[in-house]
Amino acid sequence: MRKSVFNLITAAVLAMTFTGCSKDTEVSKTYTRVGISKLTIVNYPQVNENGEDWDSSLSGVYPDIYFQLVKTGTEEALYTLPTSSRLEDLRVVDLPRSWADPNGGTFYVLGDLNQSIYVDLYDYDSFDSNDFVGSVTVDFGDYTSGSSKYPSTITKTSGSVSIKLELVWLE
């Protein structure tokens, strides 16, 4: 009886060794593009660079925020949020606030992961030029290697500006 229990345990251990510890054969994917499905403002400066309110008391004091994606090293706008989608009179206490593709997809796809971009925030003004609120730089090449490559979200901060991007990595 002892010998049959021992043989049964030995057989079970051997079976688990050969079936339960198989080598992971899944090949890691390599992506060549990244889509942005959601952009969230986490923080922005409460006042402009002169220490004044973003807007006059007649127009609501708080900024009407929109964003633009710009190719670094240039002033080439890759994507500009329609001003009709801006966040009107956005107060810092109301953050975070987001924009997402209304169809649940991506609103912008970057085809070159070696290209970094600026995410520029602006205060829309009806009667004069729009005010630059701030910017963060995103280098997508930083997210294509290492132990945490191809994250679904990244948060970038520069000064008082902080944004979060929700990403879809594409082949």
Image (tube, helix red, strand yellow):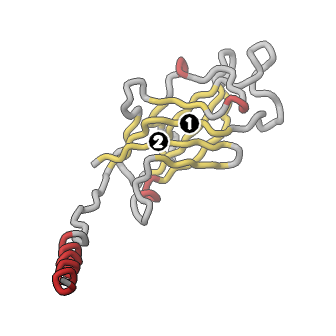
Please tell me which of labels 1 and 2 falls first in the chain.
Answer: 1
Identity of the residue drawn at 83% across and 35% down = 51
Callout 1–callout 2 Cβ contact below 8 Å: yes
Read off the residue under disc 1.
Answer: 40
Quarter of the figure with residue 105: top left
Residue, far top: 58
Q: Horizontally, is 121 left or right of 144 in the view? A: right
Residue, far front: 1
Instruction: Give the Cα distance between marks 1 and 2.
Output: 8 Å
Label 2 crowding class (10 Å Cα cut-off): few <14, some 14-19, many 20+? some
Q: Horizontally, is 19 left or right of 84 in the view? A: left
Q: Secondary structure at mark 1?
A: strand
Residue 154 on image: x %, y %: 51, 49
Can the viewer see residue 86?
A: yes
Residue 126 on image: x %, y %: 65, 16
Residue 59 on image: x %, y %: 74, 15
Q: Secondary structure at mark 2?
A: strand
Looking at the rendered structure, the kind of residue marked 1 is Thr
Can the viewer see residue 23?
A: no
Read off the residue under disc 2.
Answer: 166
Q: Horizontally, is 70 left or right of 33 in the view? A: right
Q: Is 81 above or below relative to 154?
A: above
Identity of the residue drawn at 55% across and 31% down = 98
Quarter of the figure with residue 164: top right
Quadrant for the N terminus in the image: bottom left
